Amino acid sequence: MTEHDSTAEVVVPENAVTLDVVEVRSGAFGVRGSGDTSGFGGVVRTVTLPAPSVRPYGEWFDDLADELEASMGAAGIEESAIRSVVVDRGEITFIVERERFRDMAQVLRDEPGLRFEFCSSVSGVHWLGDEGRELHVVAHLQSITHNRRIRLETTAPDSDPHVPSLVQLYPTADWHERETFDFFGIIFDGHPGLTRIMMPDDWAGHPQRKDYPLGGIPVQYKGATIPPPDERRSYS
Amino acid sequence: MGLEEKLPSGILLTSVEKLAGYSRKNSLWPATFGLACCAIEMMASGAGRYDLARFGMEVFRASPRQADLMIVAGRVSQKMAPVLRQIYDQMPEPKWVLAMGACASSGGMFNNYAIVQGVDHVVPVDIYLPGCPPRPEMLIDAILKLHDQIQDTKLGSNREREVRELETVALGATPLIDQRGLLR
Amino acid sequence: MTTTPDDTTGTWPGTSSAEEVLDDTFEADLDDVDDVDDFDELSHDDYASAYETTEGKVYTVGGGDWDTIEAPAEGEQERLVVNMGPQHPSTHGVLRIILELDGETVTQTRCTIGYLHTGIEKNLEYRSWTQGTTFVTRMDYLSPFFNETAYCLGVERLLGITEQIPERASVLRVMMMELNRVSSHLVCLATGGMELGALTAMIFGFRERETILDLFEMITGLRMNHAYVRPGGLKEDIPEGSEQTIREQVALVRSRLKDTANLLVDNSIWMGRTVGVGYLDLTGCIAMGVTGPPLRATGLPHDLRKSQPYCGYETYEFNVATQTTCDVYGRFLIRLQELEESLNIVDQCLDRLRPGPVMVEDKRIAWPAQLSIGSDGQGNSLEHIRKIMGTSMESLIHHFKLVTEGFEVPAGQVYQAIESPRGELGAHIVSDGGTRPYRVHFRDPSFVNLQAVPAMTEGSFLSDVVAAVASVDPVMGGVDR
């Protein structure tokens, strides 16, 4: 291996985008401390999500983004409401600020050129290592008129897990938001009745968060026990 | 044996226990407690091809007050466990429980926060049936084994003695974790 | 829920105390009472006559004091709240419906779910990508192939290998999915018929379903919960000579479908129970997010196999069944028609099957397929075992790493939606670049369709609730996951 000269200039291409590092994990396979001959203990993995895309997005995404920006202007939503746009694997995701989550959904639903009248699902994702942006709320919208799908995503910190509710726009989001609250603790402001839906009503904790254990029991065999899946060694 | 030969034909001798066991096992009415995938296989065993009616069991009673056998078919979640116990308590004696499937017997593949790891945490189980889901033929085999168990159940003071013996055996049995050095 | 007597007066709330009753009656003419029995009658009261006996004071409660009970508050009607509990023969699984009734009419409906919540989505985060198939298949247990296919298509999109899936694998996936659609609709018709009283429909439905399950067992080895579709292709190819068997059985099922149709279509009793029941028009469906047969019963021919095709569905010829009546009968007719269409698609699949691999070529992903039953009764490919154990160390290491660690999927998220028998089944899969899913969320059609049950049933009769829920065809495994 050649020696790396830290004072050399790093050449950055023009359209380079800084990757968003979500989490850095070190030490795979549960190996800790000395006596690690496998080398897994020194593995460092950076977790990054797909980078925000730059124009032109390709396919029909450019037209959609143009229409959306025009409609946002007409509705009085500032351009900075869209934090980033990610075009990945044939899908487009708009990551918006959470105060504008419902306004953006309203624009997407009501504008004739956009007309995303069908909300497929609203769910959550918990990125534990990402300070200030742990809880993501993802809404999948479908336009049956134009036969298109987009994803509207927003983030909220663990310390203040409030996101505006979409129930007034899409009544179907009712149970979806209740389920997301049940599993992640995200509180949807404006929801008519935000209660637990899957877990018993007096359950403590929000099960699908990353800091909630899987909750299994060790399984007994003849002369040995196997620990539950979340306590076993894992590669990642 | 000599007495039976001297009797006129058309008379059988038996014991009250055997008669009671015979009538109980042949008209065992299951309670509908189908929860998940195993429930579909239970319905299939009640349907045309694997007929449960030939064992007197096609009548799945919706009301637990009229049922003898509770076939717990499927995974029991934490929310459902009190309901399960309440249905079991509403069944009148004598009653039996068949844990159908891996999830009812031991939690199955779902070793997590949401599933009760074995329905015997909630109700006493008479017969466990593994499988995911068990075929209808396996279910019928389990039911027939339960029939044998019911046929051999004693009554009255014999039953009390039997229960004490079973309990002594169970308390003295080696737990699974201590059974070392065995392949099966 | 139990009320306790008021300690100071010793009576139930809302009624006058015994002393008050006695005081009232004492003011009446006790001396005028003519027939006093042997025991001293202390009071003659319609509600609680008191006698002094050797045991003490004994009250005989006879009722008849309605005027002394407090009247209900102004304008407050008596509410009858009925619980169709989780254990019920007609609620399609562990669904709890709380109904507020006014006589026989339902004024409010609330569905409670979560009695079958299994934590599958969290479990998936602790298993490799290939092992995810076995969990996902048990969610909507009547349509396991659809769950598996949605998950595997999503994983393949994340991997970027969608174009490299062999054509034989796609054709077989379509065939298994359509056979599964048939078996799922048969269960819907069977249980729906049973819940409304048509028990013969149950026998017919399950009889046909057994034929289809025999096909599944022949191809995948299991009747239910197959784990047959894997990321990258299929677990194994169909056995030799099975194409002929499949054709014969499909023809058999097609001929037997006439029995159910003859029994129920244009049957005045069935139509009386289902026509005009569970009405949900297009606006209601779109607002509530309802897809599948209830949406197509409103007249909108929305089918993801046509509008956003996957697995090569754009190359098959089939019609989208629609009705315009928006009621239970319309949904029933749609399901009957979809049965016919699915059997046609299965025939088309068999026609276009060509020999080829069923797993993707990429060795980093490809699970060793082409497994066959060896002489020891185990499902292993003997050539593969011979190679990895006998000749090639690298193959053994590769097999070991592939099975224990699994393949890595590049980071990102994807939403894959397919048309399951109940509606749009969507898989939102998030990967962090590792060998395990980071987050998998399934948008289950039954979960969303159940939200629309209050809209369908409020204002109708109690028996219509059963019919409406049966027409939505919820599978609680998918609802609760």
Image: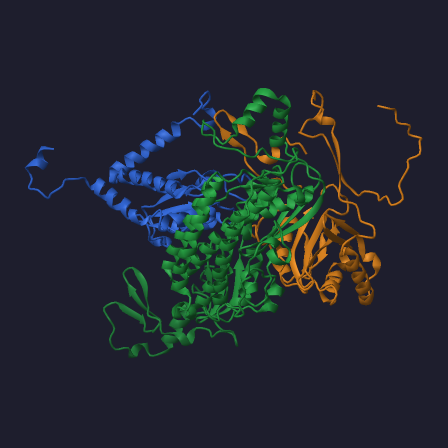
Camera-side residue of A79 and A162: A79
Q: Is residue C208 above or below residue A144?
A: above
The chain whose colour is green is C
Q: Is residue C437 left or right of residue C50?
A: right
Q: Is residue C378 left or right of residue A73?
A: left
Q: Is residue A223 above or below residue C437?
A: above
Q: Residue at x 64, y 52 (%)?
A: A180
Camera-side residue of C207 and A47: C207
Question: Does residue C429 appear in the picture of this structure?
Answer: yes
Query: In the rendered image of this protein, which colour is used for chain A?
Result: orange
Q: Is residue B84 left or right of residue B145?
A: right
x then y, percent, for residue A145: 68, 64
The image quarter in which residue A116 lies: bottom right
Question: Does residue C6 appear in the picture of this structure?
Answer: no
Colour basis: by chain
x then y, percent, for residue B104: 45, 42
Camera-side residue of C354 and B152: C354
Camera-side residue of B165 and B107: B107
Query: Number of marks in the image?
Result: 0
The image quarter in which residue C268 lies: bottom left
x then y, percent, for residue A96: 77, 55
Query: In the rendered image of this protein, which colour is used for chain B?
Result: blue
x then y, percent, for residue C192: 44, 60
Q: Is residue C278 above or below residue A220?
A: below
